[in-house]
């Protein structure tokens, strides 16, 4: 499940693709928009994204604001609010060129067909479709006809609505699709985020899945990456004290940078899933693990209770664990010396065949309990056993 956008491969086992959502936080100013591009680049985001629309094409003049918009921008109609946030075609050309100059991917969400045409002309590497347009099937079809990859947010939607949107997109031959789990509230409550839906979308549609976040702070997007999100989209602003409908759910530049850093650290921490000692653990293992040593001085010919007087488990600096080989200790052994030799045990098997009542306790670096990475431990009768479980009571020293 991977998709290529521009030169970026996105999906499982690839770095998370981070979209810094400038949205309309430029407040209609192209100069402010350029500063947002600078901030996104400085934070380490992979792409900066805006919103492209012709106000008269998307909102009727008496449309009411959403409650969160009233809280952040006051009274008035949605048309009046959005018109102040609209950028011109020339503004978008300038911003696309500026992003290219700054070496950061330029993206934007179109809300009408004219805007789709403009972004296609600007050669955006993909179309990002906002949650509000997932049931706008004519617009989805028009976007899909351009033949570019599509990133589709799924806020407010059911699995059935997502499936219907995907059917329309695929009917135009587009297979490079990324879904973004999303909760369309500004800000969204942390308890409403439902990050486990990321896995639900993966299983349901077999597509790369990311997360478009509207919560306060950076906890949710970091957790989403740990759960397998391959894309993170997050609103940001230069200053939350600036006017604008989305500022309340937006990060400031330092917070955006911290989010990017945390995501990259989480990716390192996830690793490759293979359970084996690290290089550092191999060094620590020499001190932290136990070796068998003599508890008392042992002379030749001594016959003494084996576990009670002879053996102790202590760390050994070299940790060159012994092999107990056929019932004899090779030399006189002083207390705290590493024991070398062999014990008698209840019974031994070799290749599954009984060899008599002599037994061997063998240290091996290739104890294999499954076809995976090498494991380390003691093997007795081809099974991992407690160190003393199979020992008899006496050992003979020669």
Image: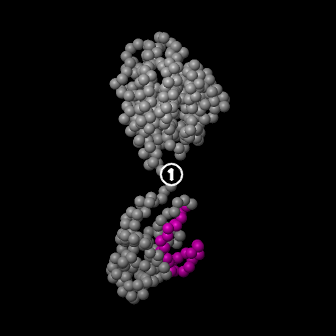
Q: Position of residue 49 (x, y in %)?
A: 49, 29
Q: Residue at x 55, y 75 (%)?
A: 349
Q: Secondary structure at mark 1?
A: loop
Q: Position of residue 66 (x, y in %)?
A: 43, 19
| Magenta span main SS | loop
Residue 226: say if magenta: no
Binning the other alpha carbons within 10 Å of mark 1 as few (below 14), some (14 to 19) or many (20 upward) gives few
Residue 179, above or below 23: below
Instruction: Tell me where residue 28 sits by quadrant.
Output: top left
Residue 353: say if magenta: yes
Q: Residue at x 47, y 67 (%)?
A: 377
- Whether residue 147 appears in this view of the structure is yes
Q: Which residue is mark 1?
A: 272
Residue 167, above or below 81: below
Q: Is residue 308 left or right of residue 131?
A: left
The span picked out in magenta is: 346-370
Q: Residue at x 43, y 84 (%)?
A: 330
Q: Is residue 258 left or right of residue 101?
A: left
Q: Residue furthest bottom?
A: 301
Q: Position of residue 256 (x, y in %)?
A: 40, 35
């Amino acid at each position: 499940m991977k998709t290529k956008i521009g030169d970026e491969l996105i999906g499982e086992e690839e770095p998370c693709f981070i979209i810094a959502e400038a949205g309309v936080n430029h407040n209609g100013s192209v100069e402010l928009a350029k500063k947002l591009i600078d901030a996104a680049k400085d934070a380490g985001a992979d792409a900066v994204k805006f919103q492209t629309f012709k106000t008269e094409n998307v909102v009727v003049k008496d449309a009411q604001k959403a409650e969160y918009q009233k809280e952040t921008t006051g009274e008035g109609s949605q048309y009046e609010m959005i018109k102040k946030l609209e950028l011109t075609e020339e503004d978008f050309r300038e911003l696309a060129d500026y992003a290219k100059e700054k070496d950061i991917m330029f993206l934007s969400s179109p809300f009408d067909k004219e805007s789709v045409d403009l972004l296609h002309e600007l050669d955006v590497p993909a179309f990002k479709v906002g949650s509000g347009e997932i049931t706008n099937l004519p617009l989805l079809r028009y976007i899909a006809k351009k033949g570019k990859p599509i990133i589709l947010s799924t806020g407010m939607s059911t699995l059935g609505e997502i499936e219907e949107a995907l059917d329309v997109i695929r009917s135009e031959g587009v297979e490079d699709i990324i879904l973004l789990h999303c909760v369309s509230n500004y800000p969204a409550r942390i308890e409403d985020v439902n990050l486990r839906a990321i896995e639900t979308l993966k299983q349901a549609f077999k597509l790369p899945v990311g997360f478009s976040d509207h919560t306060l702070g950076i906890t949710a997007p970091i957790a989403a990456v740990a759960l397998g999100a391959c894309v993170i989209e997050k609103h940001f602003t230069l200053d939350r004290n600036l006017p604008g409908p989305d500022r309340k759910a937006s990060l400031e530049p330092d917070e955006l940078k911290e989010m990017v850093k945390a995501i990259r650290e989480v990716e390192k921490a996830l690793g490759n899933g293979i359970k084996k000692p690290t290089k550092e653990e191999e060094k620590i293992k020499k001190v932290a693990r136990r070796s068998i040593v003599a508890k008392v001085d042992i002379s030749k010919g001594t016959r003494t209770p084996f576990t009670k007087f002879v053996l102790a488990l202590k760390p050994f600096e070299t940790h060159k664990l012994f092999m107990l080989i056929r019932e004899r200790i090779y030399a006189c052994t002083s207390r705290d010396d590493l024991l070398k030799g062999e014990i008698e045990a209840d019974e031994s098997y070799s290749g599954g065949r009984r060899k008599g009542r002599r037994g061997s306790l063998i240290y091996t670096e290739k104890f294999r309990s499954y076809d995976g990475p090498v494991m380390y431990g003691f093997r007795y009768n081809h099974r991992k056993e407690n160190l003393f479980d199979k020992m008899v009571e006496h050992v003979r020293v020669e």
